Amino acid sequence: MAHHHHAPGHDEHRPENTHGHDHEHLDWAELAPLLENQAELFTPLYEHALAWLAKEVTEPGLIVDAGSGPGVISGLFAETFPGARIVAVDGSEPLLDRARARAERLGAGDRFATLTGDMPGVLAELDYPADLLWASRSIHHLGDQGAALAACVERLAPDGTLAVMEGGLPSRFLPRDIGFGRPGLQARIDAVEEDRFSRMREDLPGSVAQVEDWPALLTAAGLHHTRSRTFLLDLPAPVPDRARAYVVESLTRTRDLLGEYLDPDDRVTLDRLVDPDDPASVHHRPDVFVLAAHTVHSGVRPV
C-alpha cells in the first residue's frame, strides 16, 4: 500500500500526490525512491509522533507497521523501541525488500520481519498479537475503513494500541503570490486533489462512505482512551537540497497526474514551476519551503 499528498504525504509515506490517481494501477515499487525521500525528509515529524506514542506505549514486544512501504517509519520504530520486534506489512514485495535492507543497516535485522499481502486481510497471518499497530495513511486506501480498523483491533493484544496517521493539513511549498500566474495556486491544486481523492475512495472495492471522525471510528472499532495529536514539519526557506528535490518531485507529480484537471493558466504556472531551465522554477527559487501537518489518532484495546 502506499500514500498521499496530504501526504502523498505512505505514505508521507505515500508520495504526496498519489492522491486521486488510479490506486489500483499505481506501481508503488516504481515510487520507492520518492516514498523513501519523502519519509526521510519527514523523519523529524515522525520522531515527534513516535515520542508521543512512546509516553503511553511502554516496552512493546511486537510493533506492526501496516502499509509500511519502504520501511522508513519501521526503522524509526526499531530505534525508538530497542526491545521490540518489528513486522513491516505491505502489498509490495520490492518495497519490503527495501525495508529489510534498511533494518539491516540500522543493526535491527535480527528483530525485523516482513509480511507481504493486502490490508486488512493479511493481518490474519500475523503469528502474534501486536502491542502497537501503526497505519500511516494506509487505511484510506481501503474501501471499508471501519471494517479495516476492526480488523486491526482484532490483531491487537489486550491493552495494545492502534495508531493511525490520517488527516492533518495539505502541505505548503510556496508563498501565495509567486510573482506570476494567479496567486493561490496550491489551494486550487488542493481542491482538485480533494475531488480526485473522493473519486478514488468511491471507486475502491466495497467502498463505504464514512464520516472521517477518526476518534469515533476507533471507538466504534472497540478501542478506548482515544486521543489525537498533530505534528508539524517546518522546513523554512532556504531549504536544504533534499527538501528542494522533494518539492520538485512532488510538484512534477502533481503536474503529471492532476494537470489535466487544472485551469489552463494554472497548468502554465505549474509547467514553469517544474521547468529546470526557468529561473523562477522551484529548482532555483529562494523562497521554497516545506510546511506540513499530519495527525495521529490512537486508541487502546480494553483488557
Image: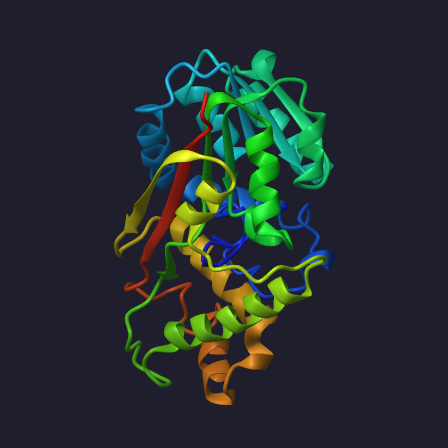
Residue 24 on image: x %, y %: 72, 57
Q: Which residue lies at the image location 55% right of the left edge and 33% below the top edge?
A: 153
In the image: residue 38, left or right of residue 120: left
Residue 158 on image: x %, y %: 49, 20
Count of numbered tags: 0
Q: Which residue lies at the image location 39% right of the left edge and 72% below the top edge?
A: 186
Residue 224 seen: yes
Q: Is residue 130 above or below residue 17?
A: above
Q: Is residue 74 above or below residue 244?
A: above
Q: Is residue 95 above or below residue 126?
A: below
In the image: residue 147, left or right of residue 173: right
Residue 279 seen: no
Q: Is residue 182 above or below residue 139?
A: below
Residue 146 on image: x %, y %: 56, 48
Quadrant including the N terminus: top right
In the image: residue 2, left or right of residue 106: right
- For residue 226, which quarter of the picture? top left
In the image: residue 145, left or right of residue 43: right
Snapshot colouring: rainbow
Residue 117 on image: x %, y %: 73, 37
- Identify which residue, 190 or 183, lies in the foreground: 190
- For residue 200, which quarter of the picture? bottom right
Q: Which residue lies at the image location 61% right of the left edge and 45% below the top edge?
A: 147
Q: Which residue lies at the image location 46% right of the left edge and 11% below the top edge?
A: 83
As drawn, the residue found furthest toward the bottom would be 264
- Identify which residue, 63 or 270, lies in the foreground: 63
